[in-house]
Image (cartoon, rainbow, N blue to C red):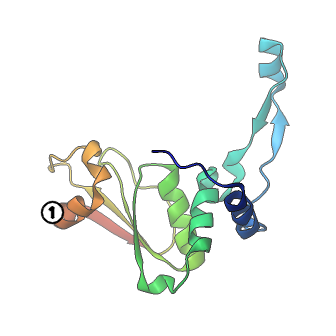
Amino acid sequence: MTTLIEFNAVVAAAERLAGKVIRTPTIAGSRLAEKIQRPVFLKLENTQLGGSFKARGVLNKFLSLKGDFNETRFVAVSGGNFGIAIAEAAKIFGANVTIIMPPTRRRPLSTGSVTWAVPSSSNPMSTRHLSAPKLWLKRDMSSSTTATIR
């Protein structure tokens, strides 16, 4: 069952994010507009922290949490922009984060208290199994390639 987001939750998120993310600029896509003979505007989400809109959701989540980030370890499963956004948030909040990535994905360049964990190539685990991080952490962390970036 899908739960709809209440308007007051959107307002609360906007208030938490005020001054923490940029108002994403848009530009006219004149060459594309000429081609399709319609106005086209390009939203430059690559100007956000971490290079995508994912920073909005990640920062909102971190800002909504209470407590000491040094006492909590966060785990994320991502081979892309979500992982980068988590790493950037870890820098800001001093959080400890482990990001589990598919073995086919190269570790992005970032800094912070982030451990990038990639299952070893000899591990028969496929990307679809990465949706169960607890199982992966228990069984396969010892055979993974990890790097802590500070």
Q: Quadrant for residue 149, please give it.
A: bottom left
Asked whether residue 110 appears in the rendered view, the answer is: no
Identify which residue is drawn at 42% across, 86% down.
71
123 left or right of 30 in image: left
Q: Vertically, is 47 above or below 117?
A: above
Residue 59: percent from the left, percent from the top?
61, 65
SS of the residue at dot 1?
A: helix
Identify which residue is drawn at 77% across, 50% down.
24
Q: How many numbered dots are placed on residues in this image?
A: 1
Identify which residue is drawn at 46% across, 85% down.
70
Residue 105: percent from the left, percent from the top?
37, 47
Please identify the quadrant where the N terminus is shown.
top left
Name which residue type carries label 1: Arg
Asked whether residue 76 appears in the rendered view, the answer is: yes
Q: Of 11 and 41, which appears nearest the observer?
A: 11
Identify which residue is drawn at 65% across, 59% down.
49
Tag 1 residue:
139
Callout 1: few (<14), some (14-19), or many (20+) C-alpha neighbours within 10 Å? few
